[in-house]
Image (cartoon, rainbow, N blue to C red):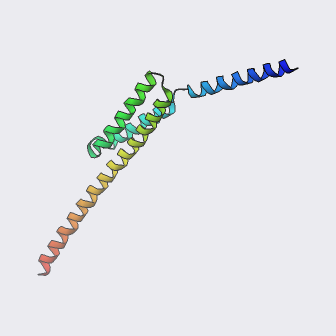
């Protein structure tokens, strides 16, 4: 009876280790895909022009994730892809903010021009 319990115990340990090993060996395809989509959205938002440093960082982090994927270093690839995703999202938001700020500046210029005209008419 003890041999049977010991045998089952070892089989269970091997199964748990095998499953655990397989779980950590999975390529982070979803993280890579999310990062790539975020980079495309950042590019569409003109982040390369309006937030060049953050966009460049996102592209570099994505490149690092692909390098880790090629080496089958999946945990590192996942971490780099997640960083690339967040940097791309930040670059997109910075680009959008820059566009809004430009519109605000144009509106302020128009308001100041109207004020100047009004002051000229009143005087």
> Is residue 46 at least partly visible in the picture?
no
| Residue located farthest toward the front when viewing the structure as drawn | 2
Above/below status of 87 relative to 30: below
**Which quadrant of the rendered structure holds the C terminus?**
bottom left
Residue in view at x 28 percent, y 60 percent: 104
Q: Which residue is drawn at the image coordinates 80% and 21% (left, top)?
A: 6
Instruction: Compare residues 100 and 35 and report the one nearer the observer.
Output: 35
Q: Where is residue 85 in the image (x, y as percent from the top left)?
A: 43, 39
Residue 104 horizontal side relative to residue 6, left or right: left
Q: Give percent across and percent down for residue 80.
A: 43, 34
Q: Which residue lies furthest to the bottom in this view?
A: 123
Instruction: Pick the residue in front: 12 or 71.
Output: 12
* x and y, in percent, of residue 18 in the image: 65, 22
Give 86 or 104, whichever is nearer the viewer: 86
Residue reaching furthest to the right:
1
Residue 68 sits above or below residue 123 on the image: above
94 relative to 73 in the view: left or right: left
Residue at image position (17%, 68%) is: 113
């Amino acid at each position: 009876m003890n041999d049977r319990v010991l045998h089952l115990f070892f089989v269970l340990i091997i199964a748990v280790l095998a499953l655990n090993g397989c779980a950590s060996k999975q390529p982070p395809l979803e993280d890579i895909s999310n990062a790539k989509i975020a980079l495309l959205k950042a590019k569409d938002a003109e982040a390369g022009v309006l937030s060049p440093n953050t966009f460049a960082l996102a592209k570099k982090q994505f490149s690092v994730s692909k390098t880790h994927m090629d080496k089958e270093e999946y945990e590192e690839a996942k971490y780099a892809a997640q960083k690339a995703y967040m940097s791309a999202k930040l670059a997109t938001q910075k680009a959008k903010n820059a566009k809004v700020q430009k519109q605000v500046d144009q509106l302020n210029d128009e308001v100041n021009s109207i004020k100047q005209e009004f002051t000229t008419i009143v005087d």
